[in-house]
Amino acid sequence: MEMPEKIISERLILERPFPASFELAEEIFAKVETSRSTLRLWLPWVDKTLRAEDEFTNYLATYCLDGWKNKSGFPYIIRLKDTNELIGGIDLMSVNEQSKSGEIGYYLCNSAVGFGYMQEAVKSLEKTAFEAGLNRIVIKNDTKNTRSVNVAKHCGYHLDGIMRQDRWSDISQELRDSNVFSKLKNEAN
Ligand SMILES: CC(C)(COP(=O)(O)OP(=O)(O)OC[C@H]1O[C@@H](n2cnc3c(N)ncnc32)[C@H](O)[C@@H]1OP(=O)(O)O)[C@@H](O)C(=O)NCCC(=O)NCCS
């Protein structure tokens, strides 16, 4: 499956974080820093990303390069079209060409929350992924992550079910439940 390196919507540009430069790592890391206390509640990678070097090594030079090369995942950074400001990330991951399935994950820095940007990003990524050949897209989230749950619902995803106590949370030191939402190609607008 092929995905474009840029996806442009009304207010956003989803961009492949490439080439993997230290300058880009510093830009992403600075944004994550502004929102660390919120992001770490829901995203395990945040506590493993303590310096710009971690952003470069773990994310840009490994996760992103491998995903795009193997076509197993397509991570994008999100920029505002008007100002080019980096506001977060969205990822089409766990892509399986045989089952034509994939999963979308996402985050925004705090200053970009509350404007409908993630709904816009999910809709534009999903449209591109269905056009590229996927049949099923999943969004998983902690049942207590209200904002993320709302993104899935507002984008028209179907709640397939709840995986009970499927995840350990280092933050709350307990096993947590996860929602599994999905959308099929024939359900997309
Ligand atoms: C999950 C997350 C991306 C949601 O961000 P968000 O801004 O709430 O998401 P949306 O794009 O759906 O925006 C909805 C909000 O924008 C408002 N909004 C403003 N203009 C809007 C528009 N044109 N369209 C839709 N919503 C709009 C809505 O009213 C809503 O705000 P409210 O809940 O305060 O009423 C963000 O909270 C986040 O990054 N959280 C931490 C990381 C995380 O949990 N990631 C997911 C892991 S599974």
Image (cartoon, rainbow, N blue to C red):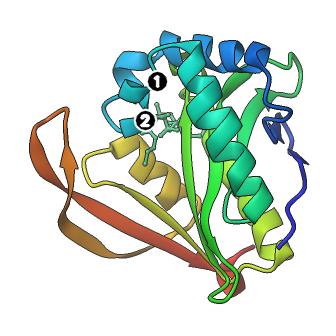
Q: Quadrant of the N terminus?
A: bottom right
Q: For label 1, count other residues whose C-alpha is less than 10 Å away and answer few (under 14), some (14-19) or many (20+).
A: some
Could you say where residue 147 lies in the image, as x and y percent from the top left? 41, 41
Residue 86 placement: quadrant? top right
Q: Residue at x 83, y 34 (%)?
A: 11
Mark 2 vs mark 1, CA separation in Å = 6 Å
Instruction: Name the side, left or right, on which 38 lies relative to 163.
Output: right
Contact, mark 2 vs mark 1 (Cβ under 8 Å): yes
Number of marks drawn: 2
User: In screen coordinates, is 99 left or right of 21?
Assistant: left
Please identify the quarter of the rendering in which residue 27 is found. Answer: top right
* Residue that mark 2 sits on: 45
- Residue closer to the observer: 47 or 83: 47
SS at circle 1? loop
Q: Position of residue 30 (x, y in %)?
A: 60, 10
Measured as percent of width and height from the top left, residue 138 is found at 52, 69
Q: Which residue is mark 1?
A: 49
Q: Is residue 129 left or right of residue 62?
A: right
Question: In the orientation shown, which residue stands out farthest toward the left?
Answer: 174
Which quadrant is home to the C terminus? bottom right
Q: Kindly identify which numbered label has been placed on residue 136.
A: none
Res. 130 visible in picture: yes
Label 2, ligand 1: CB separation under 8 Å: no
Q: Secondary structure at mark 2?
A: helix
Above or below, comparing residue 81 to residue 64 in the picture: above
Q: Amino acid at mark 2?
A: Trp
Placement of 121 over or under 167, stated as above or below: above
Q: Position of residue 137 (x, y in %)?
A: 60, 72
